[in-house]
Image: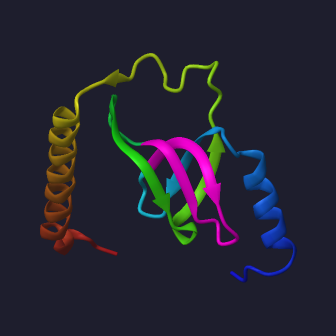
Amino acid sequence: MSWAGPEAFFLLASLCTFFAEKLLILLRDGRKLLGILRSFDQFANAVLEGACERVIVGELYCDIPLGLYVIRGENVVLIGELDLEKEELPSHMTRVSEAEIKRAQKAEREATDLKGSMRKRMEFLDMD
């Protein structure tokens, strides 16, 4: 993507509307960051104040504090403003500690790995 022309102007104008607002930013690696937009530049690099990473595993979630956080614009997939008057997550979600969410992530990763290895073992059954 070229950062010249009307696309760049539109992006910068859009970021201006989010200045000093609480945002949810989705990164290319799937992480979700929350924080208050304090600064940005023409490359969509951004600085979040009071940033945290929201980790969700099933119906469990945890906000891991990051403090002041710099995000490279090329890693941003989506930026959205959070409505501070509304509940951010559905009521069935349960907030847990950082240690608990890391255990849940590990269990989820192991289950995914097991599923993948079982699929590889059964490939010979594929009759396509």
Q: Quadrant of the C terminus?
A: bottom left
Q: Residue at x 38, y 23 (%)?
A: 93
Q: Quadrant of the N terminus?
A: bottom right
Q: Residue at x 64, y 18 (%)?
A: 85
Q: Main secondary structure of the magenta part?
A: strand
Q: Is residue 64 above or below residue 41?
A: above
Colour pattern of the rendering: rainbow
Pick the residue in front: 89 or 22.
22
Q: Is residue 114 above or below residue 24?
A: below
Residue 66 in the figure: left or right of residue 21? left
The magenta stretch is 32-51
Q: Is residue 42 above or below residue 24?
A: below
As drawn, the residue found furthest toward the right would be 6
User: Residue 46, located in which quarter of the rendered image?
Assistant: bottom right
Q: Is residue 64 above or below residue 10?
A: above
Question: Does the magenta segment cover residue 127?
Answer: no
User: Residue 86, located in which quarter of the rendered image?
Assistant: top right
Question: Residue 13 appears at what percent x and percent y?
Answer: 82, 58
Question: Residue 110 appears at what percent x and percent y?
Answer: 14, 52
Pick the residue in front: 116 or 48.
48
Question: Does the magenta segment cover residue 43?
Answer: yes
Question: Residue 2 appears at what percent x and percent y?
Answer: 72, 83
Residue 44 in the figure: left or right of residue 28? right
Q: Residue at x 49, y 26 (%)?
A: 89
Pick the residue in front: 51 or 111.
51
Question: Residue 74 appears at what percent x and percent y?
Answer: 55, 72
Image mark count: 0
